[in-house]
Amino acid sequence: MGSVNADSNGNRRRIRYVVAGLWQFATRRRTTAVALGILLCLLLLAAVGPYVAPFDADELRVTDRLQPPNRTHLLGTDHFGRDILSRALQGTRITLLLGVSISAFALCVGLPLGMLAGFFDRFGLVVMRVVDAIMAFPAIILALALMAILGKPGIPNVVLAIGLVWAPRMIRVVYSATLALRESVFVEAARALGANTSRILLRHIAINLISPVIVQTTFTFAFSIMEVAALNFLGVGIPPHVASWGGMMNEGKTYVIRAPWIILFPGLFLATAVLSFNLVGDALRDRLDPKLRGVA
Amino acid sequence: MLTFVARRAVGLVVSTLLVITITFLLMQMIPGDPASVMLGSNATPEQIERLRDTWGLNEPIYGQFVQYIVNFLQGNLGESLFHHKPVLGIIGQRAETSLWLGLAALIVVVGLGIPAGVLASIRPNGLTDNIMLLVALAGASIPSFWLGLMLMTLFAGHLGWLPSSGFTSILETGNLGNLRNLILPAFSLGFVNAALVARTARSSMLDVLQADYITTARAKGLREWGVIMKHAFRNASIPIVTVISFTFASLLSGAVVTESVFALPGVGSLIVQSVLKRDYPVIQGVMFVVAVLYVVVNFLTDLSYALLDPRIRYR
């Protein structure tokens, strides 16, 4: 019994330690706290948004079209009389969903490939040449071409197109971190103790890649939701009838001078989300890896 | 210096070949037979067979690839499915607008970014520095198309100071006044990057201003402005040049969206229209031209390092 208690005590202490660390990270700088607060709000809105939205996001009310912000429609209505606030809330969910999927995709492709490229010289030479060549294509142009090649607009294709744009950037970050780790003393020690390659990669290198990878994932998230919005704005992202921030701005651009609120508010949602992700990313970078400060 | 240039030139050629390979592979990913996809559903079997022949699609894949590279190196990027004109010619017609826009945006980037960064570095954590930090953060998070639309509402809509969209050739009409149409697009495109350049200029200047030779220069009794411009700025310029060359890539990206917002007839709006129409040869051609441009700019950036810092030539 005693040993079980000691174990759970140890676990509790460890959890308390982690929570204290997170709390310290969240509150040490005011900007980080604000950014994390905004992110939590966005998550909450994504979860409950459609239930608390004042109107149905897709309901057309032609009599209410192009209304400026007022008491009934807090953020106004678009050219079909749809409520901007309700649509923006709906867009929050799809944006976060896409951001998570794209970051996960970039991570799943970038982490293993980057590690292997950093560890095995010849493989690395080939992979990094290809990565460099892919990065010669500006992000949005590559994403547009991929959308054209993949066929129909739709969520899976958007994830694939933008994921393929960001995976090479993840590979590059993991690659250069692995190169440095490979030469470190603890890897040499592990090798001297007779550890095989897979053990070194998984137990000694992968663990130490967590910090740069978390930081890069945050930035991938921020950039990818901006790119999703750009694709939707250009009309080649997800189908136009699904409410998204970029899609709303696309539909509103014809009315921009008469009814700027159609574009103003989705853009503010987007800018706020991107800004808070960038702030959290910066703070994480400073916290996790002081060496990386001011690099990317 | 000559070996330095030669080595970089080899890299340039390798990168260009890889870019061609990637566009080739991407076009292989189009589901179905490329010839029938490219000709659309109204094509007759004879037309499809003829196109398969001209593209060498009946040959094995490595034969196709060799043919593809030869075509590209000869400047034959294929023919548009909709305009029935050579792709290179179409891109050429659109290039003027994009070049003016790029140039104007670059002026915004350099003209706003560098002075702002240098000013911020003179008194770190001062008022200018903090305002700069705030603007830079906002600049990195605001989508350029949204900024463009908002500027359009304000300056073209409410104030009526500037035209809201469109652009006509300056080379054909000889009318420099057309540049007015590019003020709003260039600002919305350049602003984001100006923020980035300002941050880099600031941190690079701060590094250099602590060097011993700056102390020496001050001790010699040089005027502060002379120290900053002549001694600090030139030595701080390498990271700034790097970031401006990155900026170039992001200007290329941003131009796609900005040209669509302001209805400018440039290469960026060309690729968007081609994607919407599935005009694959044009998409492929634009990708190729833009990537090669990017590779060449990187090459020139490397050369400029050697000019700015003589030590790099011998590495």
Image (tube, coloured by chain):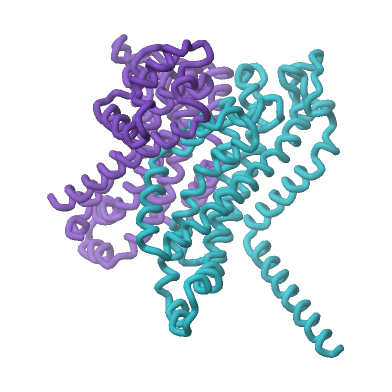
Q: Is residue A281 left or right of residue B288?
A: right
Please report the residue visible at 56 percent of the width from the left and 66 percent of the height from the top: A288
- Locate residue B167, reporting x and y percent: 42, 15
The answer to which quarter of the image holds residue A247 is top right
In the rendered view, tell whether residue B67 sits above or below residue B302: above
Compare residues B273 and A195 and report the one nearer the observer: A195
In the rendered view, tell whether residue A185 sits above or below residue B104: below
Compare residues A281 and A59 and report the one nearer the observer: A59
Quadrant, the C terminus of chain A: bottom left
- Locate residue B295, reporting x and y percent: 31, 40
Figure chain in cyan = A
- Locate residue B122, reporting x and y percent: 38, 54
Confirm whether residue A169 shows in the render.
Answer: yes
Furthest-bottom residue in view? A2
Please report the residue visible at 51 percent of the width from the left and 46 percent of the height from the top: A166
Furthest-left residue in view? B2
In the rendered view, tell whether residue B219 sits above or below residue B139: below
Please report the residue visible at 64 percent of the width from the left and 22 percent of the height from the top: A252
Please report the residue visible at 34 percent of the width from the left and 43 percent of the height from the top: B245
Confirm whether residue B147 shows in the render.
Answer: no
- Locate residue A90, reporting x and y percent: 75, 35
Figure chain in purple = B
Q: Is residue B26 left or right of residue A253?
A: left
Compare residues B62 and B183 and report the one nearer the observer: B62
The answer to which quarter of the image holds residue B312 is bottom left
The mark tally for this picture is 0
Q: Is residue A151 left or right of residue B184?
A: right
